[in-house]
Image (tube, grey):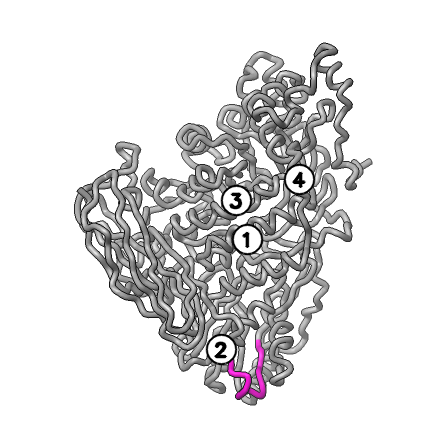
Amino acid sequence: MRKAYTNASRIIKVLTLAVILRVSGANAQSTTPVYMDDTKPIKERVEDALKRMTLKEKIAVIHAQSKFSSPGVARLGIPENWTTDGPHGIRSEVLWDEWSQAGWTNDSCTAYPALTCLAATWNKDMALLYGKSIGEEARYRNKNILLGPGVNIYRSPLNGRNFEYMGEDPYLSSKMVVPYVKGVQQNGVAACVKHFALNNSEGNRHTVNVNVDDRTLYEIYLPAFKAAVQEGNAWAIMGSYNLYKGQHCCHNEFLLNDILRKEWGFEGVVVSDWGGVHDTRQAIFNGLDMEFGSWTNGLTEGNSNAYDSYYLARPYLKLINSGEVGTKELDEKVRRVLRLAFLTTMNKNRPLGSFATEEHALAARKIAQEGIVLLKNKGNVLPINLSKTKRVAVIGENAIKMMTVGGGSSSLKARYEVSPLEGIRKRFGNQAEVVYARGYVGDTSGNYNGVNTGQNLAEKRPAAELLAEAIKVAKSADVVIFIGGLNKSDRQDAEGYDRESLSLPYNQDKLIAELAKVNKNLVVVNISGNAVAMPWVNQVPAIVQGWFLGSEAGNALAAVLAGDANPSGKLTFTFPVKLTDNGAHALGQFPGNKDEVTYKEGIFVGYRWADAHKIKPLFAFGHGLSYTTFQYGKVTADKNTMSASDKVTFSVNVKNTGSREGEEVVQLYITDVKSSLPRPVKELKGFEKVSLKPGEQKTVSFTVDKTALSFFDAAKHEWVAEPGDFQALIGASSADIKTKAAFKLQ
């Protein structure tokens, strides 16, 4: 009989003090045991609890007992640990030992925008709001580990999981992940930052060994994780599926022991990705603390109650009992799991949280609006002038298709989802007629792990008829809004698969080109978490990057199209014209073969590659337009020479020269004029989002020290800032530098 899965199963009744005292052997004059006394330091509580645990209890707490939970110690009143996917919302409940839905009626969450959208706000306050809001939902559902955020670097536009991450730049990702982590953890919920590390493609993710030099590892692929640990104080890290130096990353000596623990001082738990563990001895000695999702000893996926056969379960206990391994490593793992409990489930001051509230819906909408990027707006087609618009044509399957379901582990059972068409009709409907034509058929399914959208997207009409209808509708409209792009189907934006092409699927390019011929007021909204090719870019006057926007998708998009919200998002990755404009593809190293991939492009990822090879992108990293205009003054520096222990501050005046209030992301890049090693033409080292009323100007300042000038010297295994000439470049994107200043490092 399957173990019952109810709210009651999560509630572990703390034993009476008399029982605890009897178990602990304390005398009658003793007070509350140290581990139960939250006035004591956590380290003391951990040691006290550890010495009371049996060997079997220690083994039990380091591996799963169900799909998403691990045991506590009921005898000592220490609760179970409950994890949940993230990172965009709290996943619906599944059965204890199956992926099938548990059938709850109160687990429909707020769907927040994908992390590509959050990063595109370039606003640390939005990251804090996001973390706080999703943390409240996790806490309300009694989860104490949120499996997110994801900070793997956008190496290729074909990586199916890019939509879950924060873009191509390590500095931007670092600055955005820290407030997210802090926001989550203020709710007594651990943020589990993932996937550590080098998980930059989905193809062959369980078998591929990533070859990367140390400099590239430290400069590009580790900074966001380091920031989450050292600045965000993340309580958990999730290992990745792939291998590095021949070891799987969930039990990787170099990544987990040498870097994460010894170099960075990480005190939290390392959680395996589901099914990411492959070897008991490596799991014992190479830094893993909690094992989830394994299928071992010949058990095939679908067999029940395999948990005692996990690598860190009975096989570990057998090695200890035989004397082949000691208990030192086990005690270290249990210490970290206990620390997690005292920070979360055993924290008496842990707030209660809230779930799927109006406040969370408003937060989701605010983040979505601020992350939407206006890529092109020739002739000011946007915002749509409703006083002069009688008929609006909305065309494209993505205008109606729900995007909260699908895509892998981030799939959600949302309380509601406002489609783009619904949002546009709600906002425009009282002032203009809104007509819809599908235009193309893409993915008609709507089911992931038993969560069903309930949409019937079946279409019997042939493609030619759909195209003809769309053209007819477009001809008679004042404005055409095409809403297409990718979806969360396999080989698009989805876990487990990489994209097969940079092109739009379902023959959308032809449809867009035909629409452009019949209506000059065409707006293309690209819904995706990835860059796409745009062969029609010169034919279309207005282009919007719409992302996967969550529950409030339609309302957020409509607000931007109508001008209620002034777009202020900026791209977090480069849109290449063609695939070979990307370094990984130019060098034939994506995704590699089944067993090996080599990051031959090294540190030249994204805009760094484009700059080094003088490639003009379709849209540059950091690019994003507004419905107003901004003027940059000349940058000034408080000094033109700095020492290694010194700092320099650069300041620039930015003025709103347009007719409406808007926000601009002012970006600071640093150039090392002459270096002993190859360096990027420029690297992002600061950004600030500033809000300006018409005619208003503000001074934006950036203070940098030698860390902003440094590169990682692999031979010395340290960060080095070489004396010499540098430049500070300030601009509106990596390709739109407005002003620069020279300075020296002594």
User: Which class describes the residues within 10 Å of circle 2: few (<14), some (14-19), or many (20+)?
Assistant: many
The question of residue 188 being in magenta is answered with: no
Q: Quadrant of the C terminus?
A: top left
22, above or below 576, in the image: above
Residue 68 is labelled as 4
Q: Earlier in the sequence, mark 1 or mark 3?
A: 1
Is there CB contact under 8 Å for labels 3 and 2?
no
Residue 10, position in %: x, y?
A: 74, 37
> SS for tag 3?
helix
- Which residue type does callout 4 highlight? Phe
Q: Earlier in the sequence, mark 4 or mark 1?
A: 4
- Which label sits in the foreground, 4 or 1? 1
Q: Which residues are magenta?
A: 384-395
Closer to the camera, 675 or 650? 650
> SS for tag 2?
loop
| Apparent side of residue 721 relative to residue 145 in the rendered image (left or right) | left
> SS for tag 1?
helix
Residue 205 is labelled as none
Residue 129 is labelled as 1
The question of residue 385 being in magenta is answered with: yes
Q: Earlier in the sequence, mark 3 or mark 2?
A: 3
| Apparent side of residue 695 relative to residue 563 in the rendered image (left or right) | left
Q: Earlier in the sequence, mark 3 or mark 4?
A: 4
Q: Residue at image x 53%, y 77%?
A: 481
Mark 3 to mark 2: distance in Å?
35 Å
User: Which class describes the residues within 10 Å of circle 4: few (<14), some (14-19), or many (20+)?
Assistant: many
Q: Earlier in the sequence, mark 4 or mark 2?
A: 4
